Amino acid sequence: MHFLDQAKIFVKSGPGGPGAVSFRREKYIEYGGPDGGNGGKGGDVVMVAVPGLNTLIDFRYAQHFKAKRGGHGMGRDRYGAGADDLVIEVPVGTQVFSDDRDELIADFTQEGQRVVLLEGGMGGRGNASFKSSTNRAPRQHQPGMPGEEMWVWLRLKLLADVGLVGLPNAGKSTFINAVSNARAKVGDYAFTTLVPKLGVVHHKGREFVIADIPGLIEGAADGAGIGDRFLGHIERCRVLIHLIDISGTGDADPVEAMRIVEGELEAYGAGLEDKARLVVLNKLDLADAELAADFADELKAAGADEVFAVSGATGAGIEKLLDAVLAYLPERTMTEQPSELPPEADAEPLPEKPWSPLG
């Protein structure tokens, strides 16, 4: 299954069914009269958030969704049947934007959440409903109201409690594999992670969901590297873990690495610059403790509140870090359901231009 987090679709509700023109004609009935029934209501377009999905890939192959027309009215005062609603299933975390991407129409944050996107047209009146004391044999009827239609953008923002950020090769994939049930690809080259990865962490009787996104480089807000589009997947996180490589193999020293990532979070906006974050020196197994302590002092002088030192490869320091993470999360035991997060998805070729709801 491929990963896709944005799609544009066309939706149209069903038109109402037309009313009928009919007159009663029965043997041995002295007087007849109009008996045309009303038309049925057209189908609504309804979106529902369902578990088990974490991609919008289905909307790559089906972009047009049209609800059915209401049934025709018939003689003998028979009304047309109302059309069934057209139900579109989307992953939890999906947002629906208008065609110009300026208006947020719906935000699906809970499993089972249901939104009527477009209402079907009302059925037309049959001639029986036009009968009056002065109009005993009406022949007029209504055709039924047309349905509504529009193009909308779907944008998926995965639900996670904790988000990982950092430069490429900061060790985010190794870290998420070490602390959760994720199986992210690990490689000794930049941008090993191309799409968000999710994992569930079990720690001291509690559990939470952690998300790993592709690495950021300076200028990501302007499209450098993979860009910053995937930052949308950590907008809902309660706390961010900023991993910094101290092995000496990176292109930037820890203070510069923190400055670059902080700058990209601020350039992206959406409240990421104000989120609580834990600064973490990673790859402790490739550096001595004295060097890590010196880097920690430099990062605190540069604005970090508290600095942790860990090794995703050996597990050193991870328990202390996870203890700190729990302080930012609501109480939830392992028997309770975390945010509904389905299995990971494989990579999908990225679009040429990063996407934003604001264009």
Image (spheres, helix red, strand yellow):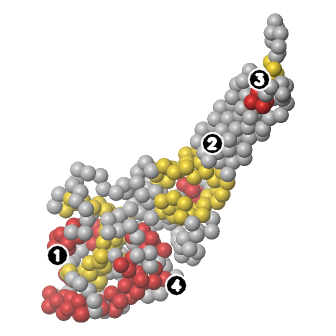
Q: Residue at x 46, y 57 (%)?
A: 108
* Residue 79 in view (yes/no): yes
Q: Please give the residue where the numbered disc 2 appears in the rendered image.
A: 43
The numbered disc on residue 222 is 4
Q: Which mark is residue 35?
A: 3
Q: Residue placed at 34% from the left, 92% from the top?
A: 256
Q: Amino acid at mark 1?
A: Gly
Mark 1 or mark 4: whose residue is earlier in sequence = 4
| Residue placed furthest toward the left | 290
Q: Say few, some or many: other residues with alpha carbon within 10 Å of mark 1 (under 14 / 14 to 19 / 20 or more).
A: some
Q: Is label 3 in contact with label 1 (beta carbons under 8 Å)?
A: no
Classify mark 2: helix, strand or loop.
loop
CA gap between label 3 and label 2 equals 25 Å
The amino acid beneath tag 2 is Gly
Q: Name the kind of residue labelled 4 in the image.
A: Asp
The local secondary structure at tag 1 comes to: loop
Q: Is residue 202 above or below residue 85?
A: below
> Which quadrant is the C terminus positioned in?
bottom right
Amino acid type at circle 3 is: Asp
Q: Nearer the viewer, mark 3 or mark 2?
A: 3
**Rendering quarter of residue 102:** bottom right
Please tell me which residue lies in front, 167 or 27.
Answer: 27
